[in-house]
Amino acid sequence: MSRPIGPRRKSPPANRPDGFEPPYDAFEPRFREMNDLVMVIFGIERRSGNGEDLKGRLLTEFNHEAGPTILEHAEVKTGFGPSSLIWFAYWRSKDAYTEWQDSSAIETLFDDETILSSDYGLWREFCHISLDHNETSFSRATDLTGLSAYADALEVTPLHAYWGSMRDRIVAAADSALDAELLSLNGNEHGLGKRIRFAAPANTCLIKTTQDWSQTTPEQTDMYMSDVRPAYEDGVSFTRQNGAEVGCIGARMVREHSMDGEPMDRTVTIGFWTSIGHLEEWTHSHPTHERIMGEFMGMVERFQGEPGLGLWHEVTVFPEGRLVGEYLNCTTDGTLMAMLGSQIYSDQIGEQYDV
């Protein structure tokens, strides 16, 4: 007999209104054998240099026999961070990732001191994801990406389309408020000419959210581009420029590309937040997010519940030691480095963490 597909939250959802029925379907992945997995965000920050040699070295390691089993590629959109190439690399387990570390030349690449004096930067953001600290939601049950490509099943979830549903979908939130340990963002640290490596505090939150317009009709595309997307980009810009106010450590908006470098009809936003509570507060009450929701619901209404967009996200709250950033010769913009001005990090820069 197969094991139950999980994880599942055992207690009743704390935030769902009595009698609430979602106005449209959303899907969440279920897994039989997996308890956790690894995603690493790799990036090459291009300034005056193009980093093509570094890109070739990274791709060689990705193609190693123990390399990532899911690999997505993107470039930072103009105005949403330094010009950068990005890869989202996934492994089914920490052991699988460690095998790649030990058998490939990736550590040799990150030990290369010549990068510190070059005209480009290199980074990795190691995310050890516990599925009971994660929730993932899809607006359609096709074209699965990211960790959901590992799923054994998709289920329609009743826990969506109401305030607090994100928290209700996280199993660990049934027993913990998942409050922030990082209480302020005072960082002015930059990594130009430096190697900076540190672990984020417990309950730091990551959201990776995707917008896909590859299947929209011309009329739907026009409305998305003219109404919804400008509101969304303004919201992302606000969190980037006012991180200390709202609790956003760093955010990047990227255009997804094929592995051959061809642009896709898909954008991805990666945002690090001091806690899920800070992310909730912005999404629930800030005018920039209210505008996003208003424009999107206008599109839903106009197209009678079928806007054609593919929307999905991964939200993870990290226990201590499970989110580690390493930056070689990088600027602060969009990274975890904004937290480095806080007192709790005064002695941690350069320490080694198990990634």
Image: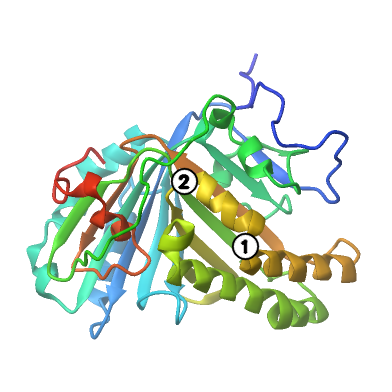
Number of the label disc, if any, that sits on residue 275: 2
Number of the label disc, if any, that sits on residue 350: none
Task: Please name the residue shown 53% across and 29% down the image.
Answer: 172
Residue 161 visible in the snapshot: yes
Task: Please name the residue shown 28% across and 38% down the image.
Answer: 98
Crowding around mark 2 (Cα neighbors within 10 Å: few <14, some 14 to 19, many 20+) is many
Quarter of the image with the N terminus is top right
Q: Nearer the viewer, residue 87 or 238?
A: 238
- Residue 91 pos. (x, y %): 41, 43
* Circle 2: residue type: Ser
In the depicted structure, whether residue 123 falls above or below residue 85: above
Q: Mark 1–mark 2 contact, CB under 8 Å?
A: no
Residue bearing the label numbered 1: 286
Q: Residue 220 sits in which quadrant?
A: bottom right
* Callout 2: SS: loop
Q: Nearer the viewer, residue 145 or 295?
A: 295
Task: Please name the residue shown 59% across and 35% down the image.
Answer: 170
In the image, farthest residue toward the right: 304
* Circle 1: residue type: His
Task: Please name the residue shown 54% across and 52% down the image.
Answer: 279
N-terminal-most mark, 1 or 2:
2
- Residue 292 pos. (x, y %): 68, 68
108 relative to 238 in the view: left or right: left
